[in-house]
């Protein structure tokens, strides 16, 4: 475990984490202003998790929530949700789930289930009961996270090869053959 952390935390990781935080904040702000049912506030977290590993992704999510929670205190109780999103995305990437588009759909669904369950448990604890919104759990959250995972997949595909090989986890970004014969 410590060897993986040492491997993942290189100079580029220290650049990726703040960049991911900015992308998360900008994405969340933009789509809130556009009044869409989706958030897209975890693009940075998931990208960092795929490019630099689960610990870096979790740290990106956590720091994003700390910063956003400072300005919007309603986010503060949910600090563990983006942390878990980063961990799950990084684990999915390590398992090869960001190499083919159809695997990315499954990774996005796993991330969505993790986020929805964690959010529901926190809401139950903070607000004294479950606040079940079927549209959120069955439609909004899965679509948000699946589309976010697909956006990250596309971003990793358009990165120049020179940059890809310098990332801490380039093996997560290998492109498998699209057509197997």
Image (spheres, grey):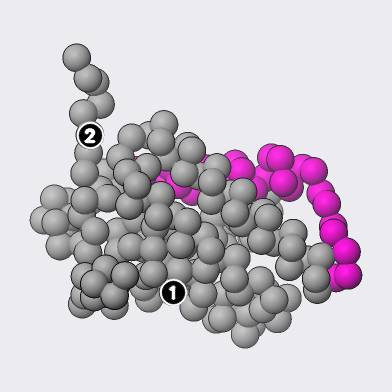
* Residue that appears at 67% across and 45% down: 140
Q: Earlier in the sequence, mark 1 or mark 2?
A: 1
The label on residue 152 is none
Q: What span is in magenta?
A: 127-155
- Where is the N terminus found, in terms of image quarters? bottom left
Q: Quadrant of residue 45?
A: bottom left
Q: Is residue 146 left or right of residue 15?
A: right
Q: Which residue is mark 2?
A: 176
- Mark 1 neighbour density, 10 Å: few (under 14) some (14–19) many (20 or more): many
* Residue that appears at 24% across and 21% down: 179
**The one of 95 and 103 positioned closer to us in this rendering:** 95
- Where is the C terminus found, in terms of image quarters? top left
Q: Which residue is mark 1?
A: 59
Q: Position of residue 24 (x, y in %)?
A: 49, 65
Query: Is 9 placed above or below 134 here?
Result: below
Q: Secondary structure at mark 1?
A: helix
Q: Quadrant of residue 118?
A: bottom right
Per the picture, the main secondary structure of the magenta-coloured stretch is helix
**The one of 172 and 37 positioned closer to us in this rendering:** 172
């Amino acid at each position: 475990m410590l060897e993986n952390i040492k491997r993942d935390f290189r100079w580029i990781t220290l650049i990726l984490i703040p960049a991911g935080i900015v992308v998360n904040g900008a994405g969340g702000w933009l789509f809130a202003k556009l009044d869409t049912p989706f958030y897209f506030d975890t693009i940075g977290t998931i990208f960092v998790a795929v490019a630099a590993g689960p610990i870096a992704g979790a740290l990106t999510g956590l720091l994003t929530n700390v910063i956003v929670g400072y300005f919007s205190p309603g986010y503060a109780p949910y600090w563990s949700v983006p942390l878990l999103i980063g961990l799950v995305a990084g684990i999915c990437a390590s398992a090869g789930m960001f190499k083919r588009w159809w695997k990315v759909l499954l990774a996005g669904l796993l991330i969505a289930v993790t986020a929805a369950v964690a959010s529901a448990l926190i809401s139950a604890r903070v607000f004294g009961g479950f606040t079940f919104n079927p549209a959120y759990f069955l439609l909004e959250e899965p679509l948000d996270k699946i589309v976010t995972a697909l956006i990250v997949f596309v971003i990793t595909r358009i990165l120049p090869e020179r940059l890809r090989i310098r990332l801490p986890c380039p093996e997560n970004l290998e492109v498998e053959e699209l057509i197997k014969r």
